[in-house]
Amino acid sequence: MDITRLLVSSLTIGALLLASCASTAPPSVPSNTPTASSSVAGPQAPSTPAVKPAAPTPSARQADQPKYGGVLTYSLYTDAPSLDPHQENSFATTVFAQSIMNGVVEFDPNDPGWRIRPGLAEKWEIGKDGTEITFGLRQGVTWHDGKPFTSTDAKFSLERAGVSPPKGAVSPRKKEFEPVERVETRGDYTLLLTLRHAYAEIMDVVASGYNLMMPKQIVEPLGGAKLRKVENIVGTGPFRLKNYDTGVGWQVVKNTAYFRKGLPYLDEVRYYVIKDESTRFSALRTKRIMMDARSPGLTTTQKETLEKGPLAGQIVVSGGLSNSLWVLQLNTRHPGPIGDARVRKAIHLGVDRQRMQRLFAQTQTHLEIGSVISPASKFAIPKETVEKMPGLRQPKDEDIAEARRLLEESKAPRGFPLTVTTREGAAYRDLSTIIVEELKTLGIGAAIKVLDTASLYDVQERRDFAAVAWSYGSWSPSPHFNFGDRFVTGGGRTQEGVSDERLDSLYARQNRSSDGEERKKAFWEMERILREEIVPYISFFWATRFTAYWKEIKGYAGFGLGHQEGNNLEEVWLDK
C-alpha cells in the first residue's frame, strides 16, 4: 500500500482537503504588494545612495560583485500565529521577525558551526567565574521610527523574552533564562547579565533568533499581550515592516539607516502565504515566487522535478538537517486511555517506524528514524544504538507482543477512539494518515482533525488534546533547549503535561556543568526515562528538508542553521 491509496481511502482526509482548498487564495501574480491592513508610522531616515560595504561578509564574497536593488518574492505555507517572537515557537514568526529585528548577539548564518557574531552588541566579556557577562552595545543605532536604541531597550527585551516576562505573557523559552539572576544597565550602552551559576548555553540563549530586541516605549504598555498590530512592530533590522495582511502576506522594505553599513542589498521583500502545496510549487516554477521557505520543504517528487526537469540549473535546490523531529505528541494528563502510560508505551512499541518511513518517504525527502536527541547534536546517541532500541528496532515481533500485553493490562477498550489533531499542510496530513493506519493495527480507532496553525497552538497551550501529529522543531540542535522547554517542571512548552523529579534533577545537574561527558550522561538518562517510562511522545523521524530558489538569488546561506535561524536576508542580492 502506498500513501496515495491511504489518502484516497480516508473519507476524513477527503473532507479536510476540501476545506483546505477553500482557504485564503494566494495572490495569482505577486507583482502587487499584499493588501495593507495598517502601516508603520514614524519618521524614516532620508534615503542615501547605495554604497559598497567596506568589508563584505563571507557569503557576499561572490565571483560577481553584489548588486543593489530589486524585490525578492518569498512563499510560506502558513501564516505566523502572531508577530511576537518572544511568545511564539513558529518558524513563520522567525521568518517574519528576523528581517525586522536584531539580537544583542546573533548566529552567523554563513557558519554551520553556529558561530556567534556581534549584533547590537559590538563586544562582550565573560567574567572569570562565568557568572557575569558585560555587553558593549553599539552607539548611534536607531529604531525604525528614528528613536535611539539603548541598553534600556535591551534590558527590557531580555526580561520580556524570559528573564521576568510580564503578567499574562506566554514565555516558551523561560526555562532557558532561569540561570539569569538579573539584567542591569550601566549607562546607555552597557548591559550586564548576572547569572546564578556558570551556564554553558547562555550565549546561545542570547543569540537565539527568538530573543530579539524590541523598543521599550512601544511594547511595554502592551503588558503581556502578543504583538499583532503593525504599528507595534518596530525594530533595528535590515528591513522595516511596511504592511501586513493576515493570511495573505507581508511586505518589508530596506532600512536605509541600518547599522551594518552597505546592507541590505535588496530594496524590498514580499512574503506570500500560499497554503496549497501544488499552488505554491507552481508559483515557484513559473517565477511568480523566487524563493520558498525552508519549512516544510520540497516533497520528494518536487525535488526530483526541479533537479531533473527542464528547470534544472535554473533553480537551486538546497537542503540540510532541519532540527525537526516528526512525532506523535501525547497528553499524559488526558482523562481517556491515552492518559495511561501503558497505552502510550504500547503505541511506542507497536508502531512500525520502518514501514511508516517507506510510506512517508514517498512525499518527504530523507528521513532518519531517531530518538528525541538530534543526530546533529554533540550529545547525539549513536545511530547503531538507536537502531537497537525497543520500538525503533527490527524485527517487530517482540515489541508488538509487549504492546498487546500492555494494552490488555491497561483495560483500555478495544478500538477506543483517539483523535489525532494536526495542523494544515500536506506533510502533516500525510503523516497523520500514516499514523492512523498504524494505530489501527493495534486496535485503536483513530481519526484526524486538522486545525489552522494559530488554533492548534492554542489547543496545545491549553493542553486540550489527546494526540497531535507534530514536528518538534527547535532553533538549536542541543537537547538542552527541547528538554528544558518541554519536559522539565516550569518549562515554557510543557504541553504534554510532564512533571517528574528525576528529569528536573538531571536537567539541573547538566545545567550547572561545563563537563561535556557529564552533560551527555544526563541527557541520555533523560531520554531513556522519557522513552521507556513516561512516553509523552512517539518519536518517528528527523527530517532533512530541501528548499528551492532561483539561481539569480545570491548570498543566501540556506540550511546552515536549520530553518528557524538565519532568516534576516540582509546579505541576499539579485544578480540581474
Image (cartoon, rainbow, N blue to C red):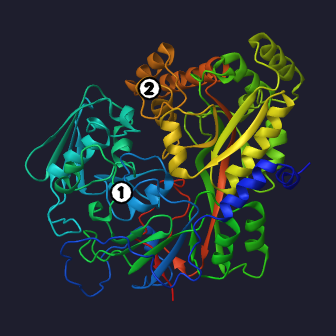
Give the residue drawn at x 65%, y 56%: 425
Residue farthest to the right, as pictured: 1
The kind of residue tagged 2 is Asp
Q: Nearer the viewer, mark 2 or mark 1?
A: 1
Does any portion of residue 390 appear in the rendered image?
no
Does any portion of residue 24 appear in the rendered image?
yes
Q: Which mark is residue 515?
A: 2
**What x and y, as percent, mark residue 473?**
55, 45
The residue carrying pointer 1 sits among few (fewer than 14), some (14 to 19) or many (20 or more) residues within 10 Å by Cα, namely some
> Which comes sooner in the sequence, label 2 or label 1?
1
In the rendered image, which quarter is residue 128 located in? top left
Q: Nearer the viewer, residue 570 or 492?
A: 492
Q: How many marks?
A: 2
How far is the residue under mark 2 from the one under mark 1?
A: 42 Å
Q: Which mark is residue 291?
A: none
Q: Is residue 180 above or below residue 408?
A: below
